[in-house]
């Protein structure tokens, strides 16, 4: 029995699996199959761009994500699907519908978790990697930052920036207050209440850097080493999360097979 397809334009039944044009209306059947791929790719690019802007990640990541999505879509569109010589047998109804639904939902959740582990792990790794190389090998010494004024600014993208100006060893310097406060204040009054004028903040001073990068809040671990640890942890935890997600997908796919048999074997070949 030949495989029957329908023309997406006129609805004509097509029995030739290798046909590229509809004999009735002349529609390009290959282009019709590829079209949804590019629509999905455009949607993925929009989601990745919105995610990058929402969480204030570096803007260079937008073209990077777009490039990876476009390459994957192009590869998928160029792959020729195998044409079936016989029609597929209808999918049997699961004998345990609840088990089938639970396993399917679990597979979907694990797939999303796998994607998030890869995305967040990559972003955290790249940010920490760049900061590590910025401070690696730079001379520094411990001193104090004397606050003379604090600032609170709402950004156009919906974020908030709070920082301070002050003196360090007789020189005017600027520093971000986020590492010092650990939480985001709601307005300027809260910043002034939590960091009044005259506050002395222990810092690391990097005299050869510029801007706020020169001043870092003092911690037991120097900035370069702390960023290096964060980058390595992002890789380790990201890979562990991806491995666990893939393992759960494999197990749940086997569990879902249980719903189609009365006495199945979970890990049979």
Image: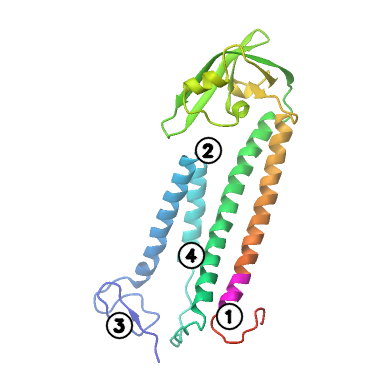
Q: CA distance from mark 3 to mark 2?
A: 50 Å
Residue shown at 37%/64% (left/top)?
A: 35
Q: Nearer the viewer, residue 194 or 15?
A: 194
Q: Secondary structure at mark 4?
A: helix
Dot 1 or dot 4, earlier in sequence = 4
Residue indicated by mark 3? 13
Is 71 on the left-hand or right-hand side of 138? Answer: left
Mark 1: give few (<14), some (14-19) or many (20+) Cα within 10 Å: many
Q: CA distance from mark 4 to mark 3?
A: 26 Å
Q: Nearer the viewer, residue 104 or 183?
A: 183
What number is the disc on residue 76?
Answer: 4
Q: Secondary structure at mark 3?
A: strand
Residue indicated by mark 1? 258
Dot 4 or dot 3, earlier in sequence = 3
Dot 3 or dot 2, earlier in sequence = 3
Q: Looking at this rendering, what residue extends furthest in the top direction?
A: 170
Residue indicated by mark 2? 58
Is 47 above or below relative to 261?
Answer: above
Q: CA distance from mark 2 to mark 4?
A: 28 Å
Mark 2: give few (<14), some (14-19) or many (20+) Cα within 10 Å: few
Is 127 on the left-hand or right-hand side of 188? Answer: right
Dot 2 or dot 4, earlier in sequence = 2
Q: Quadrant of residue 211?
A: top right
């Amino acid at each position: 029995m030949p495989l029957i397809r329908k023309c997406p334009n006129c609805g004509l039944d097509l029995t030739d699996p290798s046909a590229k044009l509809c004999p009735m209306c002349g529609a390009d059947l290959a282009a019709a199959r590829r079209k949804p791929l590019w629509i999905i790719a455009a949607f993925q690019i929009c989601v990745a761009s919105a995610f990058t802007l929402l969480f204030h990640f570096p803007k260079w990541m937008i073209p990077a994500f777009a490039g990876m999505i476009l390459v994957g879509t192009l590869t998928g569109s160029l792959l020729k699907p195998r044409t079936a010589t016989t029609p597929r047998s209808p999918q049997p109804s699961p004998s345990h519908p609840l088990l089938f639904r639970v396993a399917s939902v679990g597979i979907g959740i694990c797939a999303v978790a796998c994607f998030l582990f890869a995305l967040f792990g990559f972003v955290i790794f790249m940010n920490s990697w760049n900061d590590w190389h910025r401070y690696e090998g730079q001379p520094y010494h411990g001193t104090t930052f004397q606050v003379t004024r604090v600032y609170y600014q709402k950004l156009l993208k919906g974020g908030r920036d709070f920082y301070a100006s002050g003196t360090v060893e007789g020189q005017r310097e600027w520093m971000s207050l986020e590492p010092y406060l650990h939480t985001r204040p709601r307005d300027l009054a809260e910043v002034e209440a939590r960091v009044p004028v005259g506050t002395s903040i222990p810092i690391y001073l990097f005299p050869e850097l510029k801007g706020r990068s020169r001043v870092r809040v003092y911690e037991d671990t120097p900035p370069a080493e702390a960023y290096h640890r964060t980058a390595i942890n992002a890789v380790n935890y990201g890979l562990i999360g991806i491995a666990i997600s893939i393992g759960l997908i494999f197990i749940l796919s086997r569990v879902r097979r249980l719903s189609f048999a009365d006495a199945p074997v979970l890990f049979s070949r």
